[in-house]
Amino acid sequence: QVQLVESGGGLVQAGGSLRLSCVASGRTPSSYAMGWFRQAPGKEREFVAAINWSGGRFYYAEPVKGRFTISRENAKNTVYLQMDSLKPEDTAVYYCAVSEMLGYDYDYWGQGTQVTVSS
């Protein structure tokens, strides 16, 4: 089993920044992709960003392109999501997840961290 713990959420004004972290522990695969998703109240969970093991390939959802940056430190089993120029519509619970490779299903999920952006 792989455990994922997110942190870094909070309340921020529109235009502000937050950096989310997600630490993986337990029986982590020798290599794995990591992704961030979010779910706003009353909405479906949606993809935000993903990164491969080496960090050389990454993808972003259109609403966050140019504002969010995903990165990782494999030595720390940690993935980050730097969120800049935050908007009220970014308000959601943010989840990290692990998959065997980019494009594969995500097998493990964290409990989520709340991000609230006030206008």
Image (tube, rainbow, N blue to C red):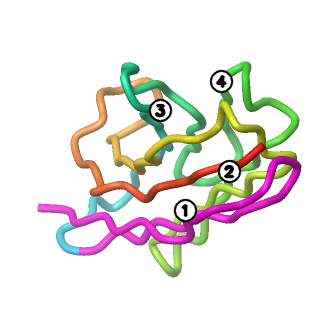
Residue found at x 28% / y 59% = 29
Please tell me how crowded label 2 is: few (under 14), some (14-19), or many (20+) other residues with Cα within 10 Å.
many
Where residue 25 sits, quadrant-wise, is bottom left
First along the sequence among labels 1 and 3 = 1
Residue type of the residue flagged with mark 2: Ile
First along the sequence among labels 2 and 1 = 2
Secondary structure, magenta segment, majority class: strand
* 117, 110: nearer the viewer: 117
Please tell me how crowded label 4 is: few (under 14), some (14-19), or many (20+) other residues with Cα within 10 Å.
few
Q: Is residue 72 left or right of residue 42?
A: right
Marks 4 and 3 in Cβ contact (< 8 Å): no
Q: CA distance from mark 3 to mark 2?
A: 14 Å
Q: Residue under circle 3?
A: 102
| SS type, badge 2 | strand
* 18, 47: nearer the viewer: 18
Q: CA distance from mark 1 to mark 3?
A: 14 Å
Q: CA distance from mark 2 to mark 1?
A: 7 Å
First along the sequence among labels 4 and 3 = 4
Q: CA distance from mark 4 to mark 2?
A: 12 Å
Residue 97 appears at what percent x and percent y? Answer: 36, 47
First along the sequence among labels 1 and 4 = 4
Marks 4 and 2 in Cβ contact (< 8 Å): no
Q: Residue under circle 1?
A: 79
Q: Which quadrant of the rendered structure holds the N terminus?
A: bottom left
Q: CA distance from mark 4 to mark 3?
A: 14 Å
Q: Magenta region: which residues?
A: 1-25
Q: Residue under circle 2?
A: 70
Q: Residue under circle 4?
A: 61
| SS type, badge 1 | strand
Residue found at x 84% / y 57% = 16
Residue 94 appears at what percent x and percent y? Answer: 47, 47
Q: Nearer the viewer, mark 1 or mark 3?
A: 1
